[in-house]
Image (tube, grey):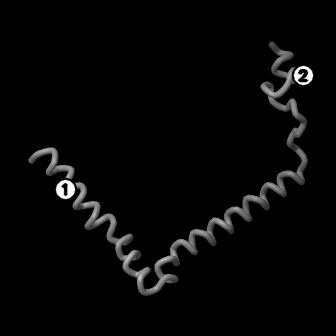
Amino acid sequence: MSLTGFFEGIQAFAEETLFAPFNALAETELTNWWGANGINWIFMIICCVAIGYWMRQLVDHNKEGEERRDAISHGFLGKDSNLEHEL
């Protein structure tokens, strides 16, 4: 078995087996656009819900007020930070 045959075998496996669902969706798109793009819509809905949840968590965290919000809260942001005083 040559190296060329090995890579052609990988190509054949990928095209016939791994890409079969994508080929089916490509054929479905010609007859039913909504059916072929349903997976995309599901992912977009999931992302919108996740972003909404994340924003809600950020709002709740900001309402607690425990975070330091001044410009020198990190040592690399200013001369008056605690890190520079320790050096």
Task: Residue at 80% x, 13% y: name it.
Answer: 87
Location of residue 24 with respect to 9 vertically, above or below: below
Location of residue 27 with respect to 9 vertically, above or below: below
Task: Residue at 38% x, 70% y: name it.
Answer: 22
Location of residue 50 with respect to 36 vertically, above or below: above
Task: Residue at 61% x, 69% y: name it.
Answer: 44
| Secondary structure state at the residue bearing disc 2 | loop
Residue 54 appears left or right of 16: right
Mark nearer the N terminus (2 vs 1): 1
Location of residue 86 with respect to 55 vertically, above or below: above
Within 10 Å of the Cα at label 1, are there few (<14), some (14-19), or many (20+) other Cα atoms? Answer: few
Q: Nearer the viewer, mark 2 or mark 1?
A: 1
Residue 20 appears left or right of 48: left
| Secondary structure state at the residue bearing disc 1 | helix
Within 10 Å of the Cα at label 2, are there few (<14), some (14-19), or many (20+) other Cα atoms? Answer: some
In the rendered image, residue 17, in percent from the top left (x then y), is placed at 28, 66
Residue found at the far left of this picture: 1
User: For residue 72, which numbered disc appears in the image?
Assistant: none
In this figure, what is the number of numbered marks? 2
Kindly identify the amino acid type of the residue bearing the numbered disc 2: Asp
Q: Which residue is mark 1?
A: 9
In the rendered image, residue 73, in percent from the top left (x then y), is placed at 85, 32
Residue found at the far top of this picture: 87
Q: Which residue is mark 2?
A: 80
In the rendered image, residue 14, in percent from the top left (x then y), is placed at 28, 60
Kindly identify the amino acid type of the residue bearing the numbered disc 1: Gly
Residue nearest the viewer, comparing 30 with 61: 30
Residue nearest the viewer, comparing 60 with 6: 6
Task: Residue at 83% x, 18% y: name it.
Answer: 84
In the rendered image, residue 27, in percent from the top left (x then y), is placed at 37, 79
